[in-house]
Image (cartoon, rainbow, N blue to C red):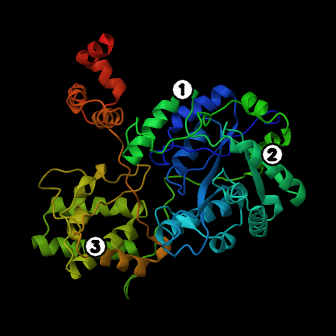
Amino acid sequence: MAEDFVHLHLHSEYSILDGAIKFPELMEKLRALGMKAVALTDHGNLFGAIEFYKYARDYGIKPIIGMEAYITAGDMREKDNADKNYHLTLLALNEKGYRNLLFLSSKAYLEGFYYKPRIDKKLLAEHSEGLVALSGCLKGEIPHKYLMEDEEAALEAAYDYIDIFGKENFYLELQELGLEENPKVNAFLLDLAKRLELKVVATNDVHYLNPEDHRAHDVLLCIQTGKKLNDDRRLRFKTREVYLKSQEAMAALFKDVPEAIRNTLEIAERVDLRLDLDPKKVHLPRFDLPPGYESADKYLRDLALEGLRNKMGEIPQEYAERLDRELEIIGQMGYSGYFLIIRDIVSKARELGVPVGPGRGSAVGSLVLYALDVTEIDPMQYNLFFERFLNPERVSPPDVDIDFGDIGRDSVIEYVRKKYGENNVTQIITFGRMLARAAIRDVGRVLDIPYSEVDRIAKMIPQRPNITLEEALAESKELQNLIESR
């Protein structure tokens, strides 16, 4: 990495409808450029962190997990000053830093969300260990205040970040994106670096991979804001330079400040983050056994037998054998406690009067779950296989999908939090991806193409789940003819 450059400010598709970079294409481009490391700094979130980490490791590229945080000018819990948010680039140096990033991102959404997921300097100071901070783009606090002709406030902000991170972990971020403000801000930051004995670092605020991607990115911004491309008042980038530039291109931009290039390597070399993502390692909350039991295996067996007897009276031999086999596998794999937790949650929901679904997915293949009243489907009656749900050859842990009614669902979640601890309970997000037909309709709207024409083209896409535009073009002769005729 001695003669290299590392991009430390980059937005993926997880900067929703703003970043236009997918990880496979990113890694291919980095490999082609000979880059050995890269940072991910999506807007206020870590949605893509694990996927990014896995892809980077698979490609032999060093992953640097970060986030472009929104720093509010006041208390993050106050729901005002929506426009007074500053950008700050945060990078995790180690596991402690990564955990602090997770904490900051979670707090930003749960307690600081007001148009954007925000944090304040007080929280940042309490969770700054293991983090490196870069002063940010033109929307960073220091550049913004300087551009507002308040140099004293910019200096005060710099001292704030020095107090939070220390001089060794706070860098002034230089960008040369062809914006008229860049030279002026960079000159100020270089002067500030000398005065305060801070280091500078070069970034390119990457939002897409290639120069020619700027038009697609512009359309993406229109989809985000619900505007049309020909709307003069819409959100748009004032530069086409925010693509993944080569080492040579970045070195040329900062030829007068070579230390800004070298310092990207310095930061990358300081990063030592290794995440244990072994799917065989499962960290389950503890299930407290009732008096008289010392083994989760024994308690689960007794509950399952009791439940099956309640349903069937005398248990038929084939059911008894199936139950024994399932319980043996569950015990061998160390999941008895997990099954007891699932039963406890479902039982509590019913006690609270919250409707619970009959069961779905591979979990309905478990006779044990049927005996525990977690599911309402007898797998023997429908010839369902337990091994689809759990078997010793399976790498990933089992998961039971449980449907709760909307009314009362929050009370179930609150019960689980209190009983098993907030550190063991989380709510996860589901991402909706734009499918081929929807993409055509959205882009058609942005380009202001008549709906009838867009609808006609969209209907040329074969009706196959998750079909891509490339696959549709390969399969649809009608679509091929349309493109060739243009």
Front tag of 3 and 1: 1
Q: Position of residue 439 (x, y in %)?
A: 33, 35
Distance from label 3 to label 1 (Cα)? 47 Å
Say above or below: 452 vs 7.
above
Dot 1 amino acid type: Glu
Quick check: 418 left or right of 378? right
- For the residues labelled 2 and 1, the Cα–Cα distance comes to 29 Å
Count of numbered circles in the view: 3
Res 269 seen here: no
Label 2 environment density (alpha carbons within 10 Å; few <14, some 14–19, many ≥20): some
Q: Mark 2 points at which residue?
A: 263
Under mark 3, the amino acid is Arg
User: In x, y percent, where is residue 101?
Assistant: 61, 62
Foreground pick, 406 / 123? 123
Q: Dot 1 lies on which element?
A: helix
Residue annotated with mark 3: 409
- Residue 142, above or below 411: above
Q: Which of marks 2 and 1 is nearer the N terminus?
A: 1
- Furthest residue to the bottom? 291
Helix, strand, or loop for circle 2? helix
